[in-house]
Image (cartoon, coloured by chain):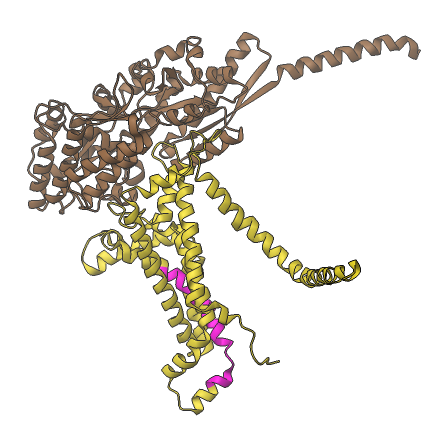
Chain colours: A brown, B yellow
Amino acid sequence: MLQALRPKLRALLLVTLASATAFALAQRVITLEAWTIGPDEPAIHRAENLEAAVDLFNEALAAEGADYRVAIDTDFETVSWDDYRRRLLLAFAAGSAPDIIQSSHLDISTWSDAGYLLPLDEYLDQYDAFGDVVGSLWDFVTYKGAIYGIPNTPEARPFYYNTTLLGELGWSAAEIEELPGRIERGEFTWSDVIEVSKAAVEAGVIEPGHGYWHRPVNGPDFYHTYFAFGGRLQDAETGQLVFTQDAALGQFALYRDLIDEGVMLGELLGTSWDEWHRNWVDGRVLFNSAGTWSWAQWAVQYGPGWDFVWDNYFFALQPAAEPGGTPTTLSQPQAYMVWSGTDHADLAVRLLSFVLTPELDVRAMESGHLPTLATTRSLPAFQENEFLSQVVYMLDYTTSQPVHEGFGRYADIFFRSISAVQGGQLTPEEAVEITADELRRALGDQVIIE
Amino acid sequence: MTPASASQPTAGALARVVRAGAALRVPALFLLPAALVVALFFVTPAVVTLYLSMTDLSARTLSQPGFVGLANYEYVLTSRWSPMILANTVRYVGLTLLFNVGMGLLLAIAISFVPERIGNGVRLLWLLPRITSPVVYVVVWQAIMARSPFGLVSELTGTSQNWINAFPWHAVIFANGLIGASFGMLIFTAAIRSIPTDLFHASAVDGATTWQTVRRIVLPLLRWPIMFVTAYQTLSLLASFEYILLLTNGGPGFYTTEVWSLWAYKEAFQSYVGNVEFGLGAAMAAFLVVTGIVASLIYLRVFRFNELLVTPKIEVN
């Protein structure tokens, strides 16, 4: 009896084993890991879009009849860029970095030189989504001839003004409304910023030192002003960094004038961000330079809502240095990068192609950022966004910081000189001379002093 | 001299060495744990720091650092800012030390001459900043010192300014000193309480005033704790920068309150675009190690450390 059953049992066992194997194969899940960072909580879409892209990816895999699925572990940081970069560096060195890293496009130089990033050129033609990225954004992620990142959430950095205070100063509604146009045409320059601020102080509309505030710590914003004075950061032909002394002198002298004329605080650098934002939202400051994401911060984080910002503030390009000059802004897009040590490079890049779908890309608006894809910018959801649809023209005037191995040093030296001028420790002329000397000492042939 | 007699002194010397070795075995055994700790937590990091300081180790070269000899030291020494930052460091360590030790001593003496319950209460209050997280402590300072209408001092004085930026050195020294003084206070209070009461009674019988008691009895007997607190705090202050980082970040303006350790930290761990320079930071840290050793040797001389270690001529059981 048992003898007779043996072949059947064997067959049953075989079928069971085959089914189990097929089931196991069908369920094979490959988990990717991604670390992301945002300036604040609204930028959490940088992580959530990866999670949503996994669903789209798995749908595609199912349609293809693939025998595996993809999952993702995401980590979203909002606290400190320094800590985030340190954590990543340790993970790179330990060989346990995440498959996908989102960070500033500027990080590409250091990390690719160290061999931590995968060049993506050979993958880009494989997926149509990459072809929809706004063309100029690829320049931000190209280093030494190779592409090391997928651009993400670009922004502009507007010059904001308090419309209520200008009204108190006697500006008509039409004059206030015309200001962005006047700035764009180069009719309202930095000299006018000083004059209007002085008038506001004299009229008692604002306290001394509250005419114009730039950011209170080191950062990209100082370069849009440097560009406005004709500065260059990188030589297009040689790739070397550039320090334009005349432009720096113009910029440093502007800061000195702003302080000497009593329209900017001499101790502005060192103010906490919190205090900086609160002074702005409390209507104590007439003009400032900030980012597109700041609009959302003032509405939601510091102010009582969107009506409040629309009722009290408006935005324009950063003014030109001279009448008839070109106004500026600056973008520092983020990039999704792929770790060179990953076992799943193909999957990581393909996952990123799913992040670049207009439905996910449009979420950039939630944090005051601009979409990455050309298609997204034509979506009703974007065009109906009153703020972003009105700042997108600024990208025509945008500038950027160079992805260069020596730029970290450059930026530290440059900022130190700005601090010295504003602190009254150096004259603008001395600061330019010292900056040039320091740049030569720190960077040697990597920098051109012109 | 026979061969046997010639070997006599050698054997005797050997025996003496063996006896001496045996005698040293027990003390060596007792010293071993401390020696291991010192080797592991001081000598090894110091050696590693010295080695790293001669490499170009950075975020970019983390996997393959190159040997650059003394180039990092040259870079630091030829920097036009080194003298300024060195002067800031001397100012910071000197003034904070003076505040820490002086205030600690004053508090300890004051506490020792009031009823114990009140003294303990004051000690507890003074310890609060020490047990508060540095970030929270500095946030409180910033809130007090901010411009109107956010800052308490601005509101009270009617002068709206960022008081930390207006008086950065006062803020740095006072914020550090409030915490540092509690350390001296604890040590000095314990030392004062361990002084035999007979001495105080004797001085009272002799008609000594409180000041004379402090000057002639308390202070001479506190020489050892004062030396310890001074040396310890000097080394701590040389290496500490967290309160400066949080309060002023070396500013306002241009290196106004930047001290050597903060400078090293920034070079080694902070960068605008992530390329931190560990090798350069290590070279800067090496200067601090040498400075700390030199300062310790000077303190041992000034406080006549050898005399403090002399065996007492009489032993009291």
Q: Is residue A182 visible?
A: yes
Image quarter of the C terminus of chain A = top left
Residue stretch in magenta: B177-200
The main secondary structure of the magenta stretch is helix
Give the image location of residue B277, x and y in percent.
Answer: 40, 36
Above or below residue A183? Residue A212 is: below
Q: Is residue A283 visible?
A: no
Task: Please check the rendered image and state whether residue B227 is part of the magenta-colored stretch, yes or no.
Answer: no
Q: Quadrant of residue B208?
A: bottom left
- Count every numbered label the image shows and give the total: 0
Give the image location of residue A264, x and y in percent.
Answer: 16, 42
Q: Residue at x 30, y 52 (%)?
A: B88
Task: Identify which residue, A113 or A116, lies in the foreground.
Answer: A113
Above or below residue A130? Residue A304 is: below
Above or below residue A259? Residue A51 is: above
Specify whether B23 is left or right of B98. Answer: right
Specify whether A41 is left or right of A182. Answer: right
Task: Identify which residue, B110 or A34, lies in the foreground.
Answer: B110
Q: Residue at x 38, y 27 (%)?
A: A107
Query: Which residue extends farthest front?
Result: B1
